[in-house]
Image (cartoon, rainbow, N blue to C red):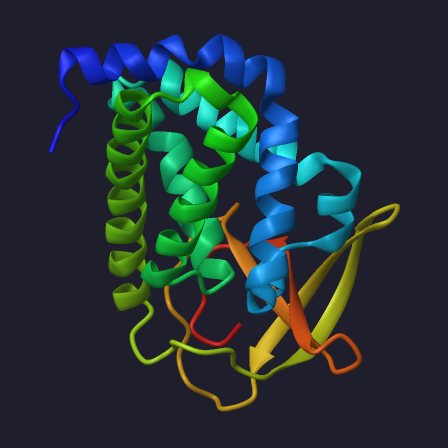
Amino acid sequence: MALSYQEAKLIQDTIPALTDHGERITTTLYRGMLRDHPELNNHFNPVCLASGRMPRALMAVILNYASNINNITELIPKLERMSHKHCSLRVIPENYSIVARYLIGTFAEVLGPAMTPSVIDAWTKAYWMLARMLAGRESQLYRSFGRWQVYRQFRIEKKVEEAQDVYSIYLVPVDGQPLPTFMPGQYVSVHVDLPAKGHHQSRQYSLSDAPQQDY
């Protein structure tokens, strides 16, 4: 359901406050969410969190969304990129419910009286509009992967030095099954278990070749 004119205006009216307090909001959000849901550490790079890079990136998304709330089509290329990134991290629809609770709660905590009940309702509605768009597209992407719905084992077939400190690594699936199609510039995740920390970490690497069936 689309936002009303008044709801969209309430969203846009929060932009100055979000700009002023943005990094504090998203840093607080991540701190509380990961404290209460440590399993979500699987999705986030601790170095990017500690440096503030990830909180700043999230606030940039929020501000961009608020600024284009009346013209969502402008965001489609960025939302497509986000959806592919989320799929590379195995984000699922249930994750959006958790983020919603901490996002709106942190808005209210940091912005205080500016987050009136009407503003909270408008932002809640706006958040779920965005979440449904992302989750819907991610569902399509997951279906396009066919049987590949979990991490698979690959072996390194070869490593080619393209330039100083730049390498192409050719990965072949151990199970010998076909690979889904992709476009250069999309991501693949490398998954590493961290038993000492009780979770795993994934790192994304860009795909640089045309899609092949065997690598």
Does 214 sit above or below residue 52? below
* Residue 177: percent from left, percent from top: 42, 85
The front one of 115 and 34 is: 115
Q: How many marks?
A: 0
| Displayed quadrant of residue 5 | top left
What residue is drawn where x is 61% and y is 66%?
38
The front one of 211 and 192 is: 192
Does 194 sit above or below residue 35? below
* Residue 14: percent from left, percent from top: 42, 14
| Displayed quadrant of residue 36 | bottom right
Viewer can see residue 207: no
**Left or right: residue 10 compared with residue 19:** left
Viewer can see residue 124: yes
| Displayed quadrant of residue 129 | top left
**Left or right: residue 53 compared with residue 70:** right
The furthest residue to the right: 164
What residue is drawn where x is 41% and y is 58%?
95
The furthest residue to the front: 113
* Residue 152: percent from left, percent from top: 52, 81
**Left or right: residue 76 compared with residue 107:** left
* Residue 10: percent from left, percent from top: 30, 13
